[in-house]
Image: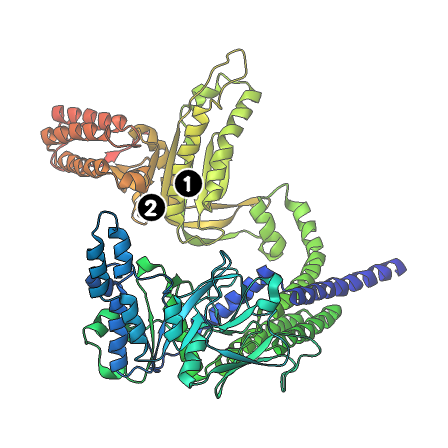
Amino acid sequence: MAQQSVTNNNKTKWVWMIPFGLLLLVIGLRILDPQPMERMRHLAFDALQQAYPRAYQPLPVRIVDIDEASLKKLGQWPWPRSILAELINKLSKGGAQLVGIDILLSEPDRTSPEEMAKLWKKGADDDFLDHLRATIPDPDSLLVEAFKSIPIVISFLAHHAGDGRTPGIKTGFAFVGDSPESFIPRYSATTPSLEKFETEAEGNGSSNALPDSDGLLRRIPLLVLLGEESSASSSVIAPSLVAEAVRVHNGVSSITIKGSGANQAENYGMNTGVVSLKIGSQVIPTSPDGSIWLHFTDSVDSRYLSAIDVLEGKVPAEEIDGTIILIGSSAEGLKDRVPTPLNPVMAGVEVHAQALEQILAKHYIERPDWIAGFEIISLLVFGMLLITLLRRSRGLYVSLVAAGGITFSLSVSVIGFTHFKFLIDPLYPVIGVLLIYLSGSLLVYLNSERERRQISGAFSRYLSPVMVKRLADNPQQLKLGGESREMTLLFADIRDFTSISENMDAEELTRFLNRFLTPMTQAILEHQGTIDKYMGDAIMAFWNAPLDDHAHPENACLTALDMQKALEVLNNKGEFAQNSDRDREISIGIGIGINSGRCSVGNLGSDQRFDYSVVGDAVNLASRLEGQSKYYGIQVVVGEATQKQVDGFAFLELDLICVLGKQKPELVFGLLGGSELLQQPHFTTLLENHHRMLSHYRHQEWEEAMAELESCRLVSREVMGCPALSGLYLLYQQRIEKFVKTPPGTGWDGVYFAESK
């Protein structure tokens, strides 16, 4: 008894220690936050965005879209900048408040007189070139002039390749709190717009996005840091296109960056990056790197104005007056597309527009520093509560608390997002609760499994593995009985097995059957079938019991096709070669019968011994159909009840037959292949000819039937992958020739009465 008490104490200790160790592991993962876990958290946030997208409001932000219609009418991009100048002038006259250009203006216009003169210089008259320069307006100059009519914000691209000059920054920066430079995304090079555009523009901002490690864009930076990390003293903070548009819109010259440690921004002794940006009177809460989380709306047409419509004056004045205009492109060929949680191909300019809408509406989704602590505390509270209950072995309470913890985490995440615009991660609390609950449940399960093994050990030598499991789970099922189910049955048998086996000794026969039955069994199991029994060289299998299978007719047909393929591989490899003095290779064939119908399935047998099996008229018919496969020269014969329930298979109607032992005729079909064969034009022709042949045959139109039969023979030879049908058409030829000599009479209905199984 003392030894038993020590053992029980050790078990109790492990029940407590294992879940506690898992709790510490999850808390450690939360602190380290590896990239795979970050990706999973982002997927959870994506689910929130998809379930609760931001409702679109008609704010004064519009996109002038260089769309497919505009490109079709005005030609390929880039357009002459005179068109862009005209577009800006139209927007200025329409009362637009400012224009942001989400297009790089980094090179001179290729249609300018200067650039064209370079192309024409060889062999051209110098006076002509001078005249060209003097008389044709420079598109870049026209665009610079257009900049004077309305506040303009241009853009540059920051990257890590090359050493482009630092763009002209129009914004002044003030700093409050800790330095943010180590947190802001850094770029070593830029592709700026031309200096003449920078000079005239009111603002100049980065058009960079900030995709996460999985490639999706969920945030957009409001700040970038330009310069090599090794030369931090010469680094320059620059605003984004969005931040510049807000600054120009608010009519201020500088942006205040508030970092950790500033007034009302706790840092707990650590530099945690940027807290917010102040642009005029507007305060924008940010992530530590100076970015904002985007809360996307669905893409709506009213956000876009086609560039060609603006140029042609087709846009109503109220759509332009008083708005912030962003010029960009949604055209697929210009490749300014980015994947977002709501749209895998969102136009890059729309991302900027949606960010501007959020800022104007003061609609921000945030993930403040305290949220990480809240997530860890939630995990710790529910984890310790579960562990305490596990020590007391109160299974029901453990389940309720685990379900409550998961529900709480998910609910807090949803409510935090929908009501407070907070991004609260449900991932770690859910993982922690699940791991603790599952580990505790596993320990309880291992104890009960010991009892189940006793049942398994007692009956595994006598019953099938399925029955053993069912008895171990529910010992009360140890009784006779069954249930009625709609099922599909399959019988498979080796052709001419008697003549093959008479030349084998016992060892050869065993090896032969093992090589045949193994891949046949694998084909059945791969398509959710249940092996009922092996009968020498034959196999019986069924579907839709003991587990539900709503596609049981289809799975049985797929199994038959896979069995044929597996047998073809075995024959080609010479797997049935005999290792004896009579050494020779054997190529074997099989017959398969398939039928569906209502059957009785369950524990069938006697009080002393029983097995899980199936009986019924549908079973008998499936067995008879397998026997008839040899008569028709077709490997797979399928009953009408199965054929009616499946699509995508190449069936050929064989006959109207009364199998031995039945009085009711059955329509039977040959299964020749899958969807590939069904879609072949030759097979469609074969079906049409075959149906006409059967129609003539059943109407005793022997001459016409024979003519169609010959057509069927010719077409069947052209059907790619179609098994030989010569045996079937020879059978019908012999029948027709017999009926020509001895007509069946006026009462004949075309039914064939089988003379053997």
Q: Quadrant of residue 611?
A: top right
Amino acid at the residue labelled 1: Thr
Answer with the quarter of the image where residue 489 lies.
top left
Q: How far across and down, in percent of the image, does residue 372 sit?
A: 63, 74
Residue 642, label in figure:
2
Figure check: 637 above or below 222: above
Residue receiving disc 1: 559
Residue furthest to the right in view is: 2
Question: Residue 587: x and y, percent?
Answer: 42, 22
Q: Nearer the viewer, residue 561 or 279?
A: 279
State the residue in front, 272 or 669.
Answer: 272
Where does the image place residue 148, in percent across and percent down from the top left? 32, 78
Residue 420 in the image: state x and y as whole percent.
52, 82
Q: Is residue 424 visible?
A: yes
SS assignment at label 1? helix
Identified by mark 2, the residue type is Thr
Residue nearest the viewer, comparing 747 with 633: 633
